[in-house]
Image (cartoon, rainbow, N blue to C red):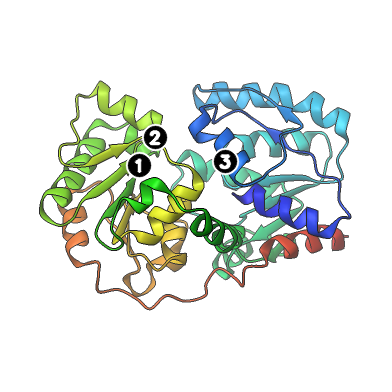
Amino acid sequence: MKLAVICQAVTKCGNWTHRIIHTGQHYDAGMSSVFFEELMIPRPDHDLEVGSGSHGEQTGAMLKRLEPILAAEKPDWVLLYGDTNSTLAGAVVAAKMGLRIAHVEAGLRSHRRAMPEEINRIVADHLSDLLLCPTELAVDNLRKEGLAERAILTGDVMYDASITYRTAAERRGGVLAESWQSGEFALATVHRAENTDDPERLRAIAGALDRIARTMCPVVWPVHPRTRKRLSEIGCLTGAVTTIEPVSYFEMLLLEGRARLILTDSGGVQKEAYFFRAPCITLRDETEWVETLEHGCNVLTGADEEQIVSAAAKIQQVGPWTAAYGDGNAGATILKALADFR
């Protein structure tokens, strides 16, 4: 979604040559190719075909396969997104090759080093030449780390995407989303390793979702392949919850816009809930998106079953929401920052 915003901005500007490197970290069609098609992103110029594996295996494969591509392309900028293993690998390879690096979504901090994404984003920020920050808090985080001179407040590309693609999604419609009455169901997503790799946390989350589905409202859960595998391994039944296959980005936007509340461990979904003014319960012990916690719009429960159920019972009394993530022009602002860099 972040890439799609930059692709749109490049097309409108017309002064950039843009090459896309796809790592293949998400290799399932439901988690990868469908997004390129829906968001009208050009086919990648390079596909590393990394696939699944441990953090070390994925990052190592990316390091090896990225170097010859960057050597051949000789880009003016290597643009990195978010906090994935591909962000870490891209930062390390580009820095060692002396290429300029810009990090989209820079400055986010959970202040929890046990979280792999935290390591990725810290390394990427400290190696990058230009830090493109979605919020004032992100800029402040970088100031505390002595990186203020590299930081620019751009607004959030995900907000750009939500504006553009929600309109497109509503125009096209979605069979799945339309089968659920607006405001009458909860939407859940669970994919973070801290939840899926810990049987007790996963059981507690599944138990809470089941209780919400039985006592409050239907729960729709698009199950990430990794999560489905873990549920099967630990013999955890989802009971009254409606589990479905991963959905497209458009379908997800429609579901988020119709949901009574959202339960998630995804940073992106937390923000989309905020953009759409849907009350959110975050199934983690911390969040990088601290702005969403204001006025109870987002509530942290961790994987505590009782806290999750209690929060779900209270979450309708929240708000107001504020314009914490910019004005919807982050893509154009990022391209200007790249062009103006000296």
Q: Earlier in the sequence, mark 2 or mark 1?
A: 1
Q: Residues within 10 Å of mark 3 (few under 14, many from 20)?
A: some
Q: Earlier in the sequence, mark 3 or mark 2?
A: 3
Describe the element under mark 2 as helix, strand or loop.
loop
The correct choice, above or below, for 137 with respect to 5 in the image is below
- Please state the horizontal and vertical placement of residue 23, each as a whole percent of the image: 64, 30
Disc 3 designates what residue? 35
Q: CA distance from mark 3 to mark 2?
A: 15 Å
Query: Which numbered disc covers residue 224?
Result: 2
**Residue 178 appears in the figure:** yes
- Please state the horizontal and vertical placement of residue 218, each as a whole percent of the image: 20, 51
Figure quadrant of residue 286: bottom left
| Residue at x-position 71% and y-position 21% | 64
Query: Which numbered disc covers residue 190?
Result: 1
| Residue at x-position 60% and y-position 61% | 164
What amino acid is at disc 2?
His
Whether the residues at callouts 2 and 1 have beta carbons within 8 Å, the answer is yes
The residue lying toward the viewer, choosing from 233 and 87, is 233
Judge depth for marks 3 and 1 and give the one in front.
Answer: 3
Figure quadrant of residue 245: top left
Judge depth for marks 3 and 2 and give the one in front.
Answer: 3
| Residue at x-position 57% and y-position 41% | 35
The residue lying toward the viewer, choosing from 45 and 78, is 45
